[in-house]
Amino acid sequence: RDFAATMPSTSPTGTRRKSPLAKLPPKSPKLAPLAPLSPRLGGLGEGQVFPAEQVGYFLWVACRQNEEEEARRLLGVKFEGAAYKPTAVLSFRGLGGKTPLHAAAFANAAAIARALLDAGANVDSLDGYGNTSLLTAAQEGHLEVVKVLLERGAVPGKSNAFGDDAAAVARRYGHLECEALVVEAAAVASPDSFAAPRSPLARGFASGANKLAFNGNSS
C-alpha cells in the first residue's frame, strides 16, 4: 500500500496538514550498477544505434570486470554519428580518468586488451595520474597483459605524475617477472639508456638464471 495514502489529510482541528513525505529530499540520480547487467544494451536490432557515451561506459565496465564476450559485443555496436569511429568509445574515461584499456590492464584481461588494441585503442594513453596501461598492469603483476602491451608497442619507460615508470612500480610491489620484462623491452627500445633490474630476483629473471637468483646469489 502507498504510505501517503494511509496518512490523514487533516489534523484533529480540521486544518489540512502536509504529508511527511513532502519533507523528504528528492532522490538523486544514480549511475547504472556495475554488475551484472550483461547484455547491457539489450537486443541489438539491425541498424540500431546508441549514444557513444553509453557504449563507452558499458565497455569500460565490461573491461573492468573481465567480461570478454560482452566487451567484444560492445566493440561491434554502432553508435550515433555519421560514421563508426571506435575512438569515441575506446577513449571513454571512467574512474580516475582510466580508459577501457586501463580497466582491462587492471583486471588482468589480456584477451580484452588485444581486442581493444585491434579496434584502435591508444596503447600509451594516460589516466588522470599519468599512468599508462602498461604501468597499471605492471603494478598489479599481470604478466600476460604486460606482454600484450609491449608486443603492441607500449613505451616501457613512460613515467607517471609521481615519476614512476612500469619497472619501478613492478619492483615496488614485488612483481619481479614484470620488472624484468619491462626492463628488457626498454633495453631493446633504447640500448644506450639500458639500466639493469635493481633487485637480484629480477636480474635472475632477465638473465635466465632463476635458480641462482632464488638462492640469493645476485652476482
Image (tube, rainbow, N blue to C red):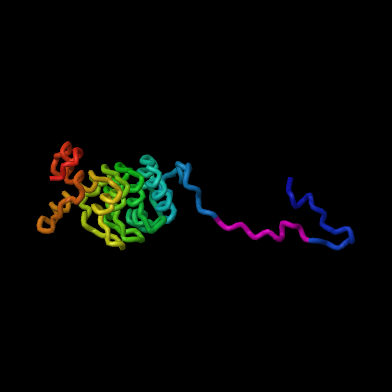
Residue that lies at the very extreme toward the right in this rendered image? 13
Q: Which quarter of the rendered picture does the C terminus lie within?
A: top left
Magenta-highlighted residues:
18-29
Q: Position of residue 80 (x, y in %)?
A: 41, 56
Classify residue 213 by image quadrant: top left
x 82%, y 54%: residue: 8
Q: Position of residue 127 (x, y in %)?
A: 34, 58
Of all residues, the one furthest to the front in this rendering is 216
Q: Can residue 80 be seen?
A: no
Say whether residue 93 is left or right of residue 167: right
Q: Residue at x 20, y 45 (%)?
A: 202
Depth check: give the residue in front, 172 or 128. Answer: 172
Count of marks, rendered view = 0
Of 11 and 141, nearer the camera is: 141
Residue visible at 84% across and 58% down in the picture: 10
Q: Viewer-proximal residue, 26 or 56?
A: 26
Q: Is residue 134 left or right of residue 64?
A: left
Q: Is residue 46 left or right of residue 190?
A: right
Q: Is residue 107 visible?
A: yes
Residue at point 24%, 49% (across, down)? 149
Q: Indicate whether residue 89 is drawn in magenta.
A: no
Q: Is residue 144 above or below residue 130?
A: above
